[in-house]
Amino acid sequence: MPKPAAIPQKPGNLALVTACYGRRGRMEAATGEELPYLAASRRHKPVCGDEVRFELRADDSPALLRDILPRRNELSRTGARERTEVVAANFSLLAIVAAPEPAPDYELVDRLLCAAAGSGAEGLIVWNKTDLGRGRPARLLEYEAAGFDVATVSALTGARIRRLRRRLKAHTSVLAGQSGGGKSTLVNALLGREAAAAGELSEKARRGRHTTASAAMYSLPGGGRVMDLPGVRSLMPVLTDYGELQAGFPEFAGPAQECRFANCRHRNEPGCSVLEAVAAGRLPAGRHAGYLALLREFEELAASV
């Protein structure tokens, strides 16, 4: 069967990728129309948030995605065979969703805060499931003391959802976090409708079922867009630059200026003012432990390259 001829058109139809499944997905054209697409070749690897050029075809076949415009930033994960894969692009805020249940993975929170800083995006911690009545853990206070923005909400009851919606209004946001933290339920609450699949916690080990298979973008009422990403089982951002790691721990910057060595990494070096601040209780020991865990991983990765 001969291929359908392309419709004559002006070059450079622009669109925004709102969902992707391998080489296929959905995009929003400049007219606001939602269109299915097919990447024109295997070298094209679009992700949610990409700005692209496309070509319409004569029949009802998906539009051909011809080109991906340069990205302003991107969020990557460790994929199959330890390969780095981009999962989202062109975002201005990374909202890190955590909750009292399942038990929060603070190393993931730290990693995502580093990824936000490294991408030039704002970082926001969204503490969900306040309806469980557990209160705010001490770690949240440590993040706030370090200068990070923290929003507390209940996606289930709608508590403080309007406030969060206003916070996201001016941004293209990425929602990320561990499975079971309520990201998809949160998206539904922000939208005011059922749009994203939401799953209950599994009874076994109270771990979250993985309900979001791929990234999807939604327009929020009143302005802004939000991307819902898969949970921690498939999203583990990679830190490739020590500057990213430093940016994720801004409370270390002041004491670090007093360290004996300019290249001090605040591990066991003599004359380290960060270590002295931790020992004196001026810096949280938990935050420093999280920094050391990411530092070990970063150095192992650097050594393997």
Image: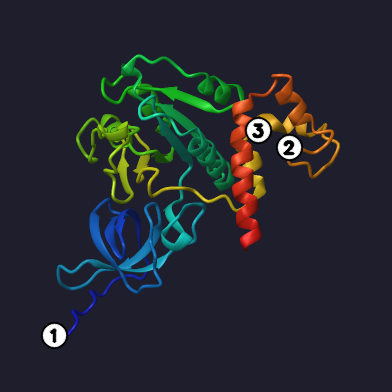
* The N terminus - image quarter: bottom left
Front position in the image: 71 or 281? 281
The label nearer to you, 2 versus 1, is 2
The quarter holding residue 301 reads bottom right
Please tell me in which quadrant of the rendered image residue 192 appears. Answer: top left
Residue at mark 3: 250
Mark 1 surroundings: few (<14), some (14-19) or many (≥20) residues within 10 A: few
User: Residue at left 36%, top 43%?
Assistant: 231
Check disc 2 and report its element: helix, strand or loop: loop
Q: Mark 2 points at which residue?
A: 266
- The residue lying toward the viewer, choosing from 59 and 154, is 154
Crowd rating for badge 3 (residues with CA inside 10 Å; few <14, some 14–19, many 20+):
some
* Color style of the picture: rainbow
Residue located at (47% from left, 30% from top): 125
> Where is residue 275, by image quadrant?
top right
Name the amino acid, label 2: His
Residue contact between numbered discs 2 and 3, judged by CB atoms under 8 Å = no
Disc 1: which residue = 1
Instruction: Give the Cα separation between the discs numbered 2 and 1.
Output: 66 Å
Q: Is residue 4 left or right of residue 186?
A: left
Distance between mark 2 and mark 3 Cα atoms: 13 Å
3 and 1 marks in contact (CB < 8 Å): no
x, y percent for residue 40: 32, 73
Q: Is residue 188 above or below residue 210?
A: above
The residue nearer to you, when weighing 214 against 223, is: 214
Q: Name above or below for residue 73 compared with residue 253.
A: below
Question: For the point 40% across and 33% down, which residue is it?
Answer: 97
Which residue is at the front of the view, 136 or 2?
136
